[in-house]
Amino acid sequence: MAQRVTLRKRQPYNTKSNRRRQVKTPGGKLVYHHLKKPGTSPKCGDCGVALPGVPALRPRQYATISKRRKTVNRAYGGSRCGDCVKSRVVRAFLIEEAKIVKKVIKSQTQPKK
């Protein structure tokens, strides 16, 4: 017959925060090991894709790791993915070019005095 295993925490319900795994100890007993929730990786604020180069941790663990592991060495480093940053740069450049073209056309259409 299988050995009975008792819970090690007070919470008896099968919830997301109370996941457990049966483990056999070197003494031959079966005990529960309570598992922690897996971390989720931070997402890009524009497109929602997981940010490469930033580890997937639980929220409190980001306070314990260094800044260089939380970001990527680029503009909008730990906030936006590279494709979104590229599209932002291109959009800003095209807007500035459009302003210059508009100014040139306006100066050409004005009659010379």
Image (spheres, rainbow, N blue to C red):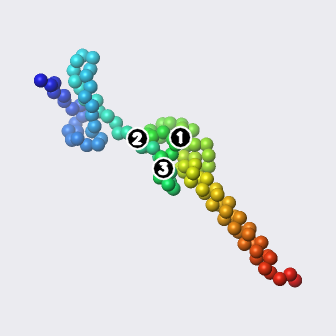
Residue 39: mark: 2
Left or right of residue 32: residue 47: right
Q: Position of residue 2 (x, y in %)?
A: 15, 25
Q: Would you say the residues marked 3 and 2 are in contact, meaning their CB atoms lie under 8 Å apart?
A: no
Q: Residue at x 51, y 56 (%)?
A: 46
Answer with mark 3 or mark 2, whichever residue precedes in sequence.
Answer: 2
CA gap, disc 3 and disc 1: 12 Å
Q: Nearer the viewer, mark 1 or mark 2?
A: 1
Q: Nearer the viewer, mark 3 or mark 1?
A: 3
Label 1 secondary element: loop
Front residue of this view, candidates 23 and 91: 91
Q: Position of residue 57 (x, y in %)?
A: 43, 40
Q: Would you say the residues marked 3 and 1 are in contact, meaning their CB atoms lie under 8 Å apart?
A: no
Residue lying farthest to the right in this orientation: 113
Residue 111: mark: none
Q: Nearer the viewer, mark 3 or mark 2?
A: 3
Label 2 secondary element: loop
Check disc 2 and give the amino acid type: Gly
CA gap, disc 3 and disc 2: 15 Å
**Quadrant in the picture for the N terminus:** top left
**Quadrant in the picture for the C terminus:** bottom right
